[in-house]
Image (cartoon, helix red, strand yellow):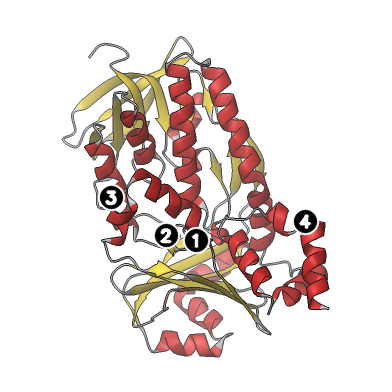
Amino acid sequence: MSPNSYDAIVVGARCAGSPTGMLLARKGYRVLLVDRATFPSDTVSTHLIHPPGVAVLRRWGLLDRLTATGCPAIHTYAFDMGPFVIAGSPGIAPHALSYAPRRTVLDKLLVDAASEEGVEVREGFVVEEVLVEAGRVSGIRGRDSGGRAVTEHARVVIGADGIHSLVARTGGAESYNERAPLQAGYYTYWSGLPMDGRFEAYDRQGRAWAAWPTNHDQTLVIVSWPYAEFEANRHDIEGHYLKALERAPQFAERVRAARREERYVGLAVSGFFRRPYGPGWVLVGDAGYNKDFITAQGIQDAFRDAEACAHALDQSFTEKQSFDEAMGEYQARRDEHAMPMFEFTCSFADLATPPPPEMRQLLGAVHGNQEAMDGFARVIAGVTSPAEFFSGENVGRIMAGAR
């Protein structure tokens, strides 16, 4: 195979990789997409696609495919703080709904969409090495699903290969704004736990949990505690999971009436930004940027990266901009958009530290003010920037309304 046989090789075929490949193929580029998994297959995930991500699926022509899987829509986000509940709409018409598909459903849908656009998809492909020639990433070496050694070259290798990205390591991607894990969370799926189109979250003094509907008439329930308790609690996950729910007796009773369908799955993640490009390589999704899962932004972040990365590479391939100029803009816009949510998520996920009195006072004032409750729900959904919602002007308006 001659060098530069592909315009792009994408390593990783889930929420960042498949859309990036699909969008490049739509622009006429030759793309190879590889993943060690075969689809459908599962992966650790919060599942949630907030309204901005749903709007992207509609723009790509894929939303009807998702709804056809029977994944239920979510129209209300409710945050139970103990003394009061804040309930609001996560979006604004016509983008007012969220969905939380199983990854066995969503990822297969995205891989198929990429293939239909002409992307060459190789499942069960293990990348063993990212090739570097004369200081520039030039391709990959690995083994296909039959175990055959394969080497491929491309103008650019795109790392959509997660937080432990081989592409990032090979390229020497610099990390910044790093944050240690703040919480540990475990989830499973329950049948017989109807949600009626609601996402429900609970905050109870060092414990937080949330529930939302997904495919197959099941509900995902995730329970979190401070990361400092990870080692002490990991030997009895189910016991600590169920004990936490007892802090909201009515919800615990609903779970006792339901049936657990699968094993418990756990996660605890660090936060970071990485420089998402270098000679011959680019990063998308959580290979380039990651934060705590409590605000469930990962899928729509991946979608946003896919669009921005495909545009930047097109600018470079067509010589409208140099590679460094196009990818520098990609990084700057990503960081500008992501930083307020990154900081808000870190503060929100710190279960070991109670919210400051002024935050408790503000949330108390939000309660009962439907416009403010919608605004808070839309912050969690990534529709409204935390910087906008928590601005002095908006906080003053909310507090004045409460008085």
Q: Nearer the viewer, mark 4 or mark 2?
A: 4
Q: Label 1: state its secondary structure.
A: loop
Q: In the picture provided, is 92 more to the left or to the right than 106?
A: right
Spatial distance from mark 1 to mark 4, Cα to Cα? 24 Å
Q: Amino acid at mark 1?
A: Ala
Spatial distance from mark 3 to mark 2, Cα to Cα? 14 Å
Q: Quadrant of the C terminus?
A: bottom right
| First in residue order: circle 1 vs circle 4 | 1
Spatial distance from mark 1 to mark 3, Cα to Cα? 25 Å
Q: Eyeballing the image, is 5 above or below 90?
A: above
Q: Nearer the viewer, mark 1 or mark 4?
A: 1
Q: Label 3: state its secondary structure.
A: helix
Q: In the picture provided, is 209 more to the left or to the right than 149?
A: right
Furthest toward the left, the residue is: 146
Count the labels in the image: 4
| Residue 113 in picture, x, y percent from top left | 27, 43
Q: Which mark is residue 47?
A: 2
Q: Quadrant of the N terminus?
A: top left
| First in residue order: circle 1 vs circle 2 | 2
